Image: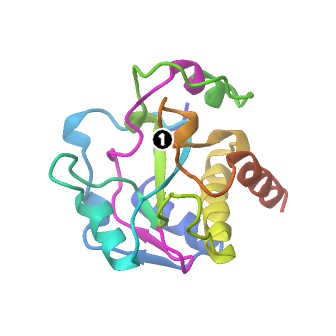
Amino acid sequence: MASPMSARAFLDALREEGLTVVEVGDWERHNRNHKGPWGPVHGVMIHHTVTQGSRRTVDLCRSGPPELPGPLCHGVITKDGRVHLVGHGRANHAGLGDPDVLRAVIAEKRLPPDNTADTDGNRYFYGFECENLGDGDDPWPEVQLEAIEKAAAALCRHHGWTERSVIGHLEWQPGKVDPRGFTMAGMRERIRDRLKD
């Protein structure tokens, strides 16, 4: 069981991992904590945005659409590899997912199929939205993939987690496909190798 990082520790961990971090507005206090608890945290969830254009993407992830108020994540990783912090605390990113997947993440074991959706993931996961159309054709620049790797590794390093604490939205909630365009197995290998340093 891990308590969520403070906003300052979150920012420092990302920078210490070598990331370029952009602080957006009052991100340290922007959250959905009034809708439910935040923590304990058990892992990191990776998403794609289905958007194009960094400024538009960051704005959307900070504010959210009318039907799903923001923040929609904690950090937005744009194609240039920068991490834009848009929230700290509970965020509308994970939704309901599979309790068996959560148990596997906590135990850092192989993930089972996600076939139910009745567990509040917004409480338990840090979330990074990554700028990409999610159509399988929009490219993932290496600088962006490296930023995803570094951001997830930074949080794993802080909490003493392995790469098995990092999952994709598609591994949590039935019907989700994100992130599309790279595999989470491959990303976890990258994170594992980084954590050896």
**Mark 1: secondary structure:** strand
Q: Which percent across, then down, holds residue 179?
A: 56, 51
Residue 115: x and y in percent read 53, 20
Disc 1 target residue: 125
Q: Main secondary structure of the magenta part?
A: loop
- Would you place residue 91 above or below residue 196 in this image? above
Which residue is more in the foreground, 182 or 128? 182
Magenta span includes 82? yes
Q: Is residue 141 magenta?
A: no
Q: Name the one closer to the observer, 103 or 142.
A: 142
Specify start and end residues of the magenta stretch as a single range.
Answer: 77-102
151 is higher (above) or lower (below) than 192: below
Q: Assess disc 1: are there few (<14), some (14-19) or many (≥20) residues with their C-alpha within 10 Å of its C-alpha.
A: many
Question: What kind of residue is marked 1?
Answer: Phe
Name the quadrant of the C terminus: bottom right
Residue 46 visible from this viewpoint: yes
Which quadrant, please, contains the N terminus?
top right
Image coordinates of residue 3 in percent, x first then y, are: 48, 39
- 32 above or below 21? above
Which residue is depicted at the point 68% across and 28% down?
111
The residue lying at 44 percent from left, 62 percent from top is 75
Q: Where in the figure is residue 162, as x and y percent of width and height?
A: 73, 43
- Does 126 appear above or below 10? above
- Residue at 41 percent across and 57 percent down: it is 74
